[in-house]
Image (cartoon, grey):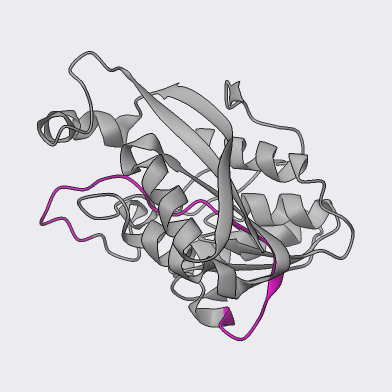
Amino acid sequence: MTTAAVRPAGLGNLWTLPGVYAPQADTFLLAEALRAEGIAKGTDLLDVCTGSGALAVLAARMGARVSATDISRRAVTAARLNAARAGQRVRVLHGDLTGPITDERFDVVVSNPPYVPTPPGRHPRKHRSSVAWDAGRSGRQALDRICAHARDMLHPQGVLLIVHSALCGVDETLRRLAEAGMHGSVTHQACVPFGPVITDRLPWLRAQGLLRPDEDTEELVVIRARRS
């Protein structure tokens, strides 16, 4: 399903600190997928790379018991404040991906991880915005780790919802999830104009063969994978 990735109802007005990823098209697309999942009251849900906490707060509003993680301390602060402002209970933990919750299992895991292919030599700092998108030369530094550990994060029949750019390789994500014992498929898609980050590195992306010279939009996808 291809959509315009518009802001869905339920996200509310979110507050962000400098250096914290603000909700945008990929957040909106993943929020749409989350709403389509029909979260039941009491669902145990984990939001990995929560950023502002937009998806965590949305899931809490839907009745889920929500945990969230982020490697950025500023993001953790922002997510906690946004949950409090929304009157929702969200447990927000500081740490790398699933590191803070290695002994727990969830019914649903959602993630909007860093996924922008990044020229060699760039090393994002944890207090800067770039930590939310720079993801190594292939854009898969976080994606591959999430795919490898997704099954272990979920209860049987649990669901992973993850959003990323097609620049990273949709088939590669599906392959890695299958290798990890998950059955995945693309459920939501959207084409969006290049943002500032992609625009800034267009020559490099085209030199790498990741974008054609005539391309002027980026495809975003949500992949849904279920643990057998």
Which residue lies at the image location 76% right of the left edge and 46% below the top edge? 37
Q: Quadrant of residue 219?
A: top left
What is the magenta range? 101-123
Q: Which of the pair 22/49 is nearer the observer?
A: 49
Evaluate whether residue 24 shows in this view: no
Q: Which of the pair 213/129 is nearer the observer?
A: 213
Q: Please state the horizontal and vertical placement of residue 56, each as a whole percent of the image.
A: 67, 57
- Residue 22 inside the magenta-drawn segment: no
Q: Please state the horizontal and vertical placement of residue 66, each as a whole percent of the image.
A: 73, 66
Magenta region, main secondary structure: loop
Q: Position of 107 compared to 206: left or right?
A: right
Q: Please state the horizontal and vertical placement of residue 99, each as a whole percent of the image.
A: 49, 79
**Farthest residue toward the top?**
214
Q: Position of 138 compared to 39: left or right?
A: left
Q: Which of the pair 127/137 is nearer the observer?
A: 137
Evaluate whether residue 165 shows in this view: yes
Which residue lies at the image location 40% right of the left edge and 66% below the top edge? 145
Q: Is residue 154 above or below residue 16?
A: below
Q: Give the quarter of the figure containing the C terminus.
A: bottom right
Q: Give the quarter of the figure containing the N terminus.
A: top right
Q: Which of the pair 1/13 is nearer the observer?
A: 1
Q: Position of 170 compared to 125: left or right?
A: right
Q: Position of 126 compared to 9: left or right?
A: left
Q: Please state the horizontal and vertical placement of residue 184, each as a whole percent of the image.
A: 57, 49
**Farthest residue toward the right?**
41
Q: Is residue 179 above or below residue 214?
A: below
Q: Quadrant of residue 84?
A: bottom right
